[in-house]
Amino acid sequence: MLLLSSDGSKTKTVVQKDAEFDVTYNDTVTSDNQTIYAFNHTVSRNKTEGVRVTVDVLSEGAESSPILFVVRQKQAVLSFQVPLILRGLYQRKYPYAHVGRTLCQPPTRSLTETQYFFVDVSTLSSLGTHYQLRISRVDSFTLHTDKKFSFTASPSQPQYFKYVFPDGVDTVIVKVNSEMTFPCSVMSIQDIQCPVYDLDNNVAFIGMYQTMTKTAAITVQRKDFPSNSFYVVVVVKTEDEACGGPLRFYPLRPDELIDAGNRSKTLDVVVSPAISSDVYVMGMLFCLGIFLSFYLLTFLVACVENKRSVDRPTVPGVTPVSPYEYGSFVTNKLTVSSLCLSERSLESVAGRSRQESLSSIEEDDYDTLADIDSDKNIVRTKKYLCVSDLARKDKRVLSKKYQIYFWNIATIGVFYALPVIQLVITYQTVVNVTGNQDICYYNFLCAHPLGNLSAFNNILSNLGYVMLGLLFLLIVLQRDVIHSRALDRNDLNALECGIPKHFGLFYAMGTALMMEGLLSACYHVCPNYTNFQFDTSFMYMIAGLCVLKLYQKRHPDINASAYTAYACLAAVIFFSVLGVVFGKGNMVFWIVFSVLHILATMLLSTQLYYMGRWRLDSGILRRIVYVIYTDCIRQCSGPMYIDRMVLLVMGNIVNWSLAAYGLLKTPNDFASYLLAIAICNLLLYFAFYIIMKLRSGERIQCMAMVCILFTAVVWGFALFFFFQGLSTWQKTPAESREHNRDCIVLSFFDDHDIWHFLSSIAMFGSFLVSVCLVCACTVDEDKAGDHSVMLIEFK
């Protein structure tokens, strides 16, 4: 056939050929001729066959005048040029002379139908360009459930396959694996419609997709695909930078074509049914059953302890001690005089009228002593301190002071949680709308969707923090009520014996545990590095509150106020955010943080050693020089407070070592590094507390020992599952998926869910240990001085 151009000066030859499948056509095309290949094939409604077009350009220099191939189908048109030019970062151009594309298969309503399609070949090159064309059938175009299929793909030869949901299956998991880390590739799930986006530059246009190195997995639900079927598309990227691979250096010259080399990749794909609704129900009942059992166990223990308290024989003149009033450390002798703090404390309280209204007490009054100010310097700097020396203030004032901890953390929790919930809902919406599953770092091999949530199991497993936090609040409330009733009946033990009992910090700890569960669940809606602080902020809170509670037991008068404590914790969270955003590989940040860490350690050590009786002013350097001269140069004298000094030296060694580690290693996960600092200091504090108690001759009661051992064992197992590392946002999403693993419990929960279960139980146990350690001063009167030194030397 001859066609005239618009000006009639040139003619162009158009040749149409009847062509057949599985035949290689060698031909030459120029600007003066165009070839059309006509194909026909029979399609069936019950059987889907893929049709693949393979093209090779054999002539040199074809990049300047590529050949255009247009495939015209009944309901679709596919066009591409050869050599195929794909772009990478910085507009780098990669030519591919060998191209293979699978044709989109329009659905047919007839039982059988003969469909025609045409392949048009043309170019604007005046020189002849030699090419090869081959059309072939893809017999394994349809994937079958639980049957693995292997194939090879490259940037210019993407592959996609069709999967049809079988009857009775509503959710499936599509897994693609490869033994090759690179080249980087993309797995996409797309609806059955034309065109299919199967090139590096358009695969992210529709559907769900994720980058991959060795593994990728996407959970697909029938409700999202009206045709009850979908395409599994696998595309190999032109560069590996998206998967954490190196970016090869090339000179950046305009329009320079770069040889990408061999980027073929062998992959396997398998589609497996996901869990049924029965497994969801079993998972939820399992989770509820575990934590409701703690409520039942607590109720039984309370009943047993109450019965033992009722059956305990009474001594004339001595009020029975409630098991909820004192802790779990006792000595061999227990007398009324040994339970009392001091005669001075008794006279002080006896002279007070308990009928005064709490509303007349202000927070500003809490630091007011009946003694003159200089008396505080004398009392708090004695070599041998008793608990009564640091429990001289009005108990009602201190109780009101420590209640502020609870109200402040409740307020902080509300203002923190509301925007967090709004943000993670937005994250989940973005993931669902865009289909970009690289936004969130799930364990995709065990991510069970529910509604709009992509990983419901990771959210459900945080229920333990909330339920056990609530249980701890109920336990504290019970003790608070019992103590208040004892005060109302003027019980001597409640008025004058043991350490002062303030429950505000306990309420704050329980609230912090509940908030940790809520915010951890929010983090797992879409876990990534930008919202990791949601998962760690209240961990810092919990560690700080536990340290404050241990210190408050023996130092109620000089413990930090709620405003100071939360301001310091806010500074910690501020540095956590800075570290996550700017800390990776930034040596300046690490130097500044390490210096501040060491300075804060030294300032806190000074505060604890001198019981707050020092001033940070312009004369501090002069006083430091004077102390060094008098105590180290003029005469060599040891520290006045030996036990206190031992703790502070150990604390400084630990913190200086952690600061040096951070400065030398600059770990990528700054938030976890900061949390490790808080946990190390808490453990050091707790160990010193226990050791000093044992030094005093106290023995640990059975309940306290059971709590300590149980908590230690659970923490050990919890940390084992924590360090399994099922994902990590310190790497690219594709590299993170290499750590993904299958579910291990009920086919519903993974290792990280078990960490949530065990860590919530371990935190609850740690809180119970803290409650058990609120003990009375149970020593003989003649040993009260030495023992009291032990009791308050722990800082």
Image (cartoon, rainbow, N blue to C red):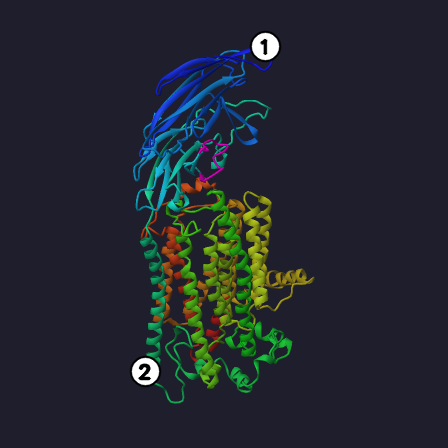
Determine contact: label 1, label 2, CB under 8 Å. Answer: no
Relative height, residue 32 to residue 761 (above, below): above
User: Residue 590's spot in the image, x, y percent?
Assistant: 57, 47
> Dominant secondary structure of the magenta stretch?
loop
Label 2 element class: helix
Point out which mark residue 732 bears.
none
Three-letter amino acid code of the residue under disc 2: Asp
Front-most of 526 and 545? 526
Number of marks in the rendered image: 2
Secondary structure at numbered mark 1? loop
The range drawn in magenta is: 194-210
State whether residue 766 appears in this view.
no
* Cα distance in 3D space between marks 1 and 2: 118 Å
**Residue 483 located left or right of residue 603:** left
- Inspect this view and state whether residue 425 appears: yes
Look at mark 2 in the image and give the residue it sits on.
311
Q: How far from the left and from the top, in percent, is residue 50?
A: 36, 29
- 206 drawn magenta: yes
